[in-house]
Image (cartoon, rainbow, N blue to C red):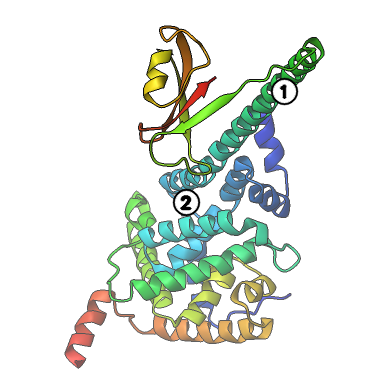
């Protein structure tokens, strides 16, 4: 496309001189520094996010592997136990509620205690063990607030 | 190895560099900056008459490139035209924001350029003429200033200018014709400096 000719030669000369003058203008170096710093700022979180994601995936894979190994071992153990026991042991247990009822899904802790059989008598439970001085194992069910909710007694 | 990578990036075309920058390639973005920062800076400097404003506009333009590289379509416009378009938009915003301020800066090259011993008078006269021409260009309405800066001072083709300005080639030609006419008039009589202009404005008020 042909450029339009100048009608004024003086103006053409002045514009040409200005064009040469302007061609010497350079962007100060600190502008480049600022622009590239902005780029780094904008892309740094993405890199961190990527690294975090990789670590998260690695942790998930490791956890899955541990669970798989654990389940495998548990399965083998159950299989062995089932085959070994000719008569399944029947265990009778009594649950005594001593506080607020335990809600479904409520997190609890089980604290195992060994107490004299006579202690159970005070709770209105008669131990199958004849000797009142003998010790029995008792599971104390403790709620999240630290207050006992129930006592489980093996009879 | 780093140099080899940089050299490979430098050899790529603008469209490829934009694509790489859109995918987070810092070298590609740096190559784009090195290739085009000067033309953006000169355009902004001529449009605003201010070094600071021009520096800010260059930053804004390349930040826009950083954000929108993925949206650039090389079939619609060559990258220089696209960058001029962004620079034009940023310049408009900047001029609108700074409308109330008075520019007091001269061109850095005027101050720093040493005067040749043998031709002091001619050099000073040349500087004076360039200063008057700059003022005359800055005093043009923006649509005329844009075509003068692009076509007469940055050697942008009419076709690329029309893409950057978002108008027909015929419009570029007619604006350029009108702009040159206005410049001739302004250069024919003394163009008032900003200080003179303020004084005149005060007198008229």
Image depth: mark 1 or mark 2 in front? 1
Q: Is residue B74 above or below residue A148?
A: below
Quadrant of res B136: bottom left
- Reading the image, the residue beneath label 2 is A26
Tell which of B53 and A40 is nearer to you.
Answer: A40
Q: Is residue B133 above or below residue A31?
A: below
Secondary-structure class at tag 2: loop
Quadrant of res B101: bottom left
Kindly identify which numbered label has been placed on residue A154: none
Quadrant of res A71: top right
Residue B8 position, x and y percent, is 71, 37
Residue B173 position, x and y percent, is 63, 83
Residue at x 67% of width, y 83% of height: B168
Label 1 and label 2 in one chain = yes
Residue at x 47% of width, y 47% of height: A38
Image-based side of B113 in relation to B148, left or right: left
- Reading the image, the residue beneath label 1 is A71
Kindly report the distance in space between the C-alpha atoms of the residues bearing marks 1 and 2. Answer: 69 Å
Residue B85 position, x and y percent, is 58, 69
Residue B199 position, x and y percent, is 19, 82
Mark toward the start of the polypeptide (1 vs 2): 2
Marks counted in the figure total 2
Image-based side of A90 in relation to A45, left or right: right
Residue at x 63% of width, y 20% of height: A91
Tell which of B87 and B41 is nearer to you.
Answer: B87
Quarter placement of the C terminus of chain B: bottom left
Secondary-structure class at tag 1: helix
Whether residue A28 can be seen here: yes
Image-based side of A108 in relation to B29, left or right: left
Q: Residue furthest front?
A: A130
> Do the residues under discs 1 and 2 have CB atoms within 8 angstroms?
no
């Amino acid at each position: 496309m042909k450029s339009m000719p100048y009608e004024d030669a003086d103006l053409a000369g002045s514009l040409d001189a200005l064009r040469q003058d302007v061609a010497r203008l350079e962007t100060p170096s600190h502008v480049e520094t600022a622009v590239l710093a902005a780029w780094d700022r904008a892309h740094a979180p993405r890199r961190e996010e990527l690294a975090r994601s990789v670590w998260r995936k690695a942790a998930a894979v490791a956890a899955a592997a541990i669970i798989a190994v654990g389940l495998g071992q548990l399965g083998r153990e159950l299989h062995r136990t089932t085959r070994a026991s000719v008569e399944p042991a029947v265990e009778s247990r009594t649950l005594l509620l001593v506080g607020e009822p335990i809600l479904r899904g409520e997190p609890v802790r089980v604290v195992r205690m060994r107490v004299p059989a006579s202690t159970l008598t005070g709770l209105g439970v008669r131990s199958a063990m004849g000797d009142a001085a003998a010790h029995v194992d008792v599971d104390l069910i403790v709620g999240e607030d630290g207050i006992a909710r129930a006592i489980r007694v093996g009879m | 190895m780093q140099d080899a990578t940089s050299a490979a990036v430098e050899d790529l075309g603008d469209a490829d560099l934009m694509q790489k920058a859109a995918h987070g390639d810092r070298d590609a973005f740096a190559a784009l900056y090195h290739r085009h920062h000067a033309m953006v800076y000169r355009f902004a400097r001529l449009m605003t008459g201010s070094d600071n404003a021009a520096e800010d506009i260059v930053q804004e333009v390349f930040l826009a490139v950083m954000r929108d590289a993925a949206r650039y379509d090389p079939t619609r416009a060559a990258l220089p035209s696209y960058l001029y378009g962004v620079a034009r938009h940023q310049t408009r915003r900047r001029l609108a924001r700074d409308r109330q301020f008075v520019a007091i800066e001269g061109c850095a090259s005027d101050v720093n350029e040493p005067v040749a011993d043998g031709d002091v008078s001619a050099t000073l006269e040349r500087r004076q003429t360039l200063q008057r021409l700059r003022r005359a260009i800055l005093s043009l309405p923006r649509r005329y200033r844009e075509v003068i800066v692009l076509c007469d001072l940055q050697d942008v083709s009419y076709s690329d200018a029309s893409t950057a300005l978002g108008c027909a080639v015929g419009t570029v030609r007619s604006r350029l014709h009108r702009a040159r006419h206005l410049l001739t008039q302004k250069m024919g009589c003394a163009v008032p400096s900003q200080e003179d202009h303020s004084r005149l404005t005060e007198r008229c008020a």
